[in-house]
Structures are given as C-alpha cells and as structure tokens.
Amino acid sequence: MSAHAFDEAIALAQQPDGSFLGRTSAAYANFIGPYGGITAAQMIQAVLQHPARQGEPVAFTVNFAAAVAEGEFTIEAVPARTNRSTQHWMVRMLQQGEVVTTATLMTASRRETWGLVEAAMPQVPEPSDVPRQPLPHRPVAWLERYERRFIEGDLPREWKGQDSGHSRTRLWLRDAPERPVDFVSLTAMADNFFPRLWLRRATQVALGTVTMTVYFHADTAVLQSTGSGFLLAQAQGQGFRHGYLDQEGLLWNQSGELLASTTQLMYFKE
Amino acid sequence: MSAHAFDEAIALAQQPDGSFLGRTSAAYANFIGPYGGITAAQMIQAVLQHPARQGEPVAFTVNFAAAVAEGEFTIEAVPARTNRSTQHWMVRMLQQGEVVTTATLMTASRRETWGLVEAAMPQVPEPSDVPRQPLPHRPVAWLERYERRFIEGDLPREWKGQDSGHSRTRLWLRDAPERPVDFVSLTAMADNFFPRLWLRRATQVALGTVTMTVYFHADTAVLQSTGSGFLLAQAQGQGFRHGYLDQEGLLWNQSGELLASTTQLMYFKE
C-alpha cells in the first residue's frame, strides 16, 4: 500500500545541523506555487518531529512571507522558551538561503478541565444528504486532495460582480482519499476555504493568504475519536479594505466538538 | 506638559547592537506582572522604531512565553523577509538572556482598493448615554489607564458560578486620559477585554493570555480621523476546553469603520 499523498507531502528529513529538509509536493500544487495549507502543515510538522518538542500543538501562526518555489526547502525550528508544561517555537522555512515562511507555535501538555463549546455547530444536513462538489474545470492539484460537500456559500455560479450580501461558507470536508485527522492535517484543512472576496463580490481578483492563525481546541484523544470522519468547516470575512481582507473560521467534527478556530488575512489586487 | 503614561510605557532606546532597551511600566501593571496589551505594544513599537522598517502594520501575533519580570527588558526585531511592498518581522523580548515574549509582524504599504465592512458595527447607544464603569475595589494600575462604558457583558455582579449563556461583551473604550489612537495603542486595546471565562461562568479562576493576533484594517489616515474618539470593542469566546479558551474580537471607531479584528487564546486553571 502506498503512502497517503498528505504524508508524502509533509515528509521531512532532519539534517546533521538540526534543520529539516523537505520538498514541495506536486499533489498539493495550487495555481501558482504550493497550497498554503500544505506549507503550514510542513512548518508544524517540523516542530512535531523535533526531538526537543514537548506537548501537543495549542496555538499556531504561519506567515507566508514569499512565494515558495518548486523544489527543496529547509525548515529551522527553534524552541525559544521551554516552561514546565508549555513550549514556544519560532520556525522559518528557507529556500536558497532566503526566508520564505515564518511561524510561531505553542505546544503544551493538556489536562482535563471544565469546558463547553460556545460557538455551537450549526444545524446542517448530514454529509450523505449534501452533494459532493465536482472538481473544477481547470485542474488544480490540491483541490483534488479534499472531498467537499457545500451546504452554503459555494463558489458563485456567475462572475458578474453582484454583491452576495455576505461571505459565509459552510461545508463538509475531509481528505480524499480518507485519512484520520491529526494536528498536521487539521492545520492544512484550516486553509481550505476559497477566498471570501470571490464569494462576496463574485469577482475573481488575484489574491493570496499572507498569514493564518490556528487555535487547537482538540487534543489527541478527540482527534482520534474523530478519525477520518467529515469536519464541518465554516468561514466568513469581516473586513475588506486597502488590499487586505480577513476571515474567521471554525472546524467541528460530526459530534459537534470544536476542533479548531482559525483566522487568516489575505491580500488582494485592485 | 508631561508625556502620556502610554508613551512613557512604550519608550524604547536602540542599543549599539541594534536591539531595543525598555522597562516595564508601573502605570500598566496587572495583578501579576505587566498588562499583556502593554507588552504587545512594546513588541510592535520596537519594529516601528527600527530603521529598516517599511510600511505600516498589517498583521501581528504576540506570544506570551513567560512572565515578564518588573524591570528592564531587551527587544530584538529582525526583518526575516523584505519584499517590494511587504516586510515580515520576527521579534523576541528577553530578560536575563531568556526569551519571555515572541512575535511576528507583517508590515506593508497600503493602497486604495474596493472595500466594505462585513462585520458591521452593531446598533448601540452613544458613549454619552452609557455610564462609565467605576474603577475596581482592588487597585489594578492598568485598569485605570482606560475609560470603559459597558453596553453588554460587564463583569458578573455575583460570582456564584451561574452560566450566563454567552460570553459576549460590547463596550465603548478609550485611553484615560485621552490620546489619539495609533497602531501601537490599538494593539494594546485589542487585549483590553476581561477573561471570557469569568463572564460565561461567573467564576474567577486564575488565567492569562498566551497568544494574541491582531489584523489592522485601518491605515494611518483612518486612525488619524478616529483621533481620541471612543472605539466600540466587542469580544466573545468560542471554545473552552482542557485549560484553554479562545476569544474573537472586533474594534470599530464611532463612524463604524473596522479598525482591527483580533483573536486570542488564554490558559485557565481549575
């Protein structure tokens, strides 16, 4: 049995100097360069593979500082601070000696406490009652790596610049083929939403994510119980101005457990 | 005329090695250590004072890696990547040679584009129609540095553990005494909300912010037109589990312009 494309894409080899060597994945290529979610996944994977790492991911921010070129890259992950139960990492991805991506990650040992989900999962149809989104006419590799069943806020059918009134999307999402969710694949899925500007404005302007933050509300046990089930993924834009737009997002499992909350900022042209 | 306490708190002196020397401010002390918002402000101020900095703040993430002790600190701000119109910074605050705070900041030159505010400012009473919150019985210095007029979701009147049903707060907020808002003071104000867990659960457990992200939707011109007017500040928790809780927040000026969106993660004990 061959490895899942996701595991191949995040495979990193630690070098004698402690850095990690990886390479971009054709399976997760976007229009130009790699899918941002796979770059984010590679950044967090470097910390998870680091021998000094303690605890599980809790909070992650990745900054897409420059285009990642096809080919090899190096990731340097440095534990900036190690406490009794938490650790703070600073991470850089380099190509040809130049920084192309930066990130910070907090890891921690979790413990049982009181808890609740205030951002409750909305009432939506079951995945089996929602049609699977067909693949786009233009082949874009990374889009084929996910199964999407849109409940609300799919791509506009007509690109005529009409204001849709809001930019909220809700969809059932999972890896294609199926793969049990973990912190690394959840990070990648947090970036799966197509740009809110395309939905709000029905205009396909050029744009790209410049930074994404993911807070992990799930621990390993919750992710294991989620397995390869669908996630309900929701995103909505908040502000669009001066060439930037933001988005807030939430990802729940089918039991309504909140796995992650996420925000991101994109640039756009025009 | 003496300087505003905020300007004194964020005053940094560049050292011969390029790092910045600052010191904690008694005026912004919290229960234990400094108010996180002032630490965040010092981190962003270091980049703004850096001679290599280009453009205005666009996206900022700060990680509170360890308690900041009273006294001096050093901030090291490094331009990890400089592009034509954007720049990515990695920032560390050190005390006694140990990292206590990390941050990343993206700066950029902004330009006019299409835009709108999807997260519209809610209909609320004018600041003059909302009573000013009295200062707390226990003196906490940083609380006195802000004028707060709570519209919704003030601190519980009784700490009896009753579930309030939601953790949304809306308040009019400005510096006390008044001070024209800028990127640095806006960063500090993004951390002004009292913990969502206290509001949701009416229980004063120990807690603290571990990371905060701020996206700036305003440019210098919008901030200048805002001046020292009130900001409408809103925050709400999304998930509480395993000793961590998150919060999303928005800050508008009185004209309904979205100045910043923000998220943060806190730890809590129980």
Image (spheres, coloured by chain):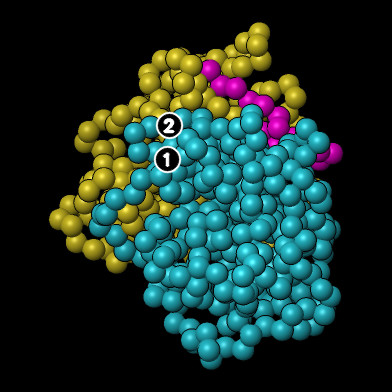
Chain colours: A cyan, B yellow
Helix, strand or loop under label 1: loop
> Does any portion of residue A219 appear in the rendered image?
yes
Q: A67 or B142, which is in the foreground?
A: A67
1 vs 2, front mark: 1
Residue annotated with mark 1: A54
Binning the other alpha carbons within 10 Å of mark 1 as few (below 14), some (14 to 19) or many (20 upward) gives many
Region of the chain picked out in magenta, as a range: B73-89
Vertical placement of residue B206 versus A201, above or below? above
Q: A100 or A268, which is in the foreground?
A: A100
Q: Quadrant of residue A75?
A: top right
Q: Which three-letter amino acid code belongs to the residue tagged 2?
A: Thr
Residue annotated with mark 2: A82
**Chain on which label 1 sits:** A
Binning the other alpha carbons within 10 Å of mark 2 as few (below 14), some (14 to 19) or many (20 upward) gives some
Dominant SS of magenta comes to: strand
- Structural distance between the alpha carbons of marks 1 and 2: 8 Å
Cβ atoms under marks 1 and 2 closer than 8 Å? yes
Mark 1 on the same chain as mark 2: yes
x and y percent of residue A180 in the render? Answer: 50, 68
B35 in magenta: no
